[in-house]
Image (spheres, rainbow, N blue to C red):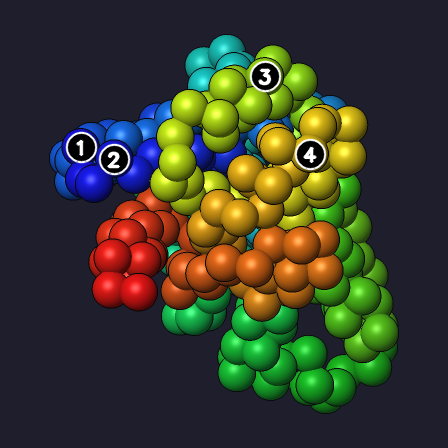
Amino acid sequence: MLDSWQVIVCRPIDKATELLELLQFNSVQGIAAPLISIEPGRDLNVMPSMLASLSRGSLVFLLSPNVFLFERHLSDAQIAKIKSSFSPNLQYYAIGQSTAAKFFDCIGLEAEYPEGKEISEELIKLPSLIEYIQNKHDNHTTREALIIRGNGGRDIVANVLKENHFYTREIEAYHRIENPSSLLQFKKSITQSIKNIIVITSGEMLENLIRYLKNEDVMIRQKTLSSYLIVVSERIAKIANTQGFSNIVIAKKANNQALMKSILETIQHAKNI
């Protein structure tokens, strides 16, 4: 393995598995410790009717590839019903390239997305979206938007739409839950290697880890906080810094290829210090 580095991947298991394969290909030891699990959301049964109720030209926001988790959990008839409800007469916006690609693979339609980081702050800066939001050509027409997302999370997109007088509704298409068994795996992994890199791709993962550390002994906390931490946004990096992490790297994107690149660059950087 590459200089005995160990990478602890805290992503949900499907994304973690893909990154572990990339790590193995690059001769880096990887351990999966998914701090959250992803399950089908409570609103999947109303998704077809919600989409069907939208008027032509309404906006639909897809805030994660996990929106399409239903493909693995529903019956063929239910899946077909949901897929057919995505009309080509609606305007689709995705949080990033990976979500847009998943949307195209699953539904066969295209969604606009920001080229930079896959975060809400970038999504709301899309020129086409800004132009549409600012267009008040017909004050008698109700402007509608549907946000398809998971539970929790931030309300940046919804707030912008509501501030601009959109009738905005939300669907919980997937549900994130804490994964206590992975905390035990994390504890075991962090103590068995001297050189660790931790991969965190959401604020919720980081919050779970921080909450866990508060109940652990000093050695575990020190080992964790002294590890290299790879995150996917300035926001998560700032939170990590306030909690005592000092070796923080921000990946350019949240996909596994970008994370793999950041991991290799981090290892190389550490070797040169």
Name the mark on residue 1: 1
Foreground label between 4 and 2: 4
Q: Amino acid at mark 3?
A: Leu
- The residue under label 4 is 218
Task: Specify which label sits upstream in the sequence, 3 or 1.
Answer: 1
Give the CA separation, mark 1 to mark 2: 6 Å
Name the mark on residue 118: none
Name the mark on residue 4: 2
Q: Is residue 155 visible?
A: yes
Name the mark on residue 184: 3
Is disc 4 placed on a helix, strand or loop? helix
Q: Which residue is depicted at the point 62% across and 81% down? A: 130
Q: Is residue 224 above or below residue 55?
A: above
Task: Specify which label sits upstream in the sequence, 2 or 3.
Answer: 2
Answer whether labels 4 and 1 touch (C-beta < 8 Å): no
Q: Is residue 209 visible?
A: no
Give the CA separation, mark 2 to mark 3: 22 Å
Give the CA separation, mark 4 to mark 2: 24 Å
Q: Is residue 256 above or below residue 30?
A: below
Q: Amino acid at mark 1?
A: Met
Answer whether labels 2 and 3 touch (C-beta < 8 Å): no
Answer whether labels 4 and 2 touch (C-beta < 8 Å): no
Task: Specify which label sits upstream in the sequence, 3 or 4.
Answer: 3
Residue placed most toward the observer, 161 or 256: 256
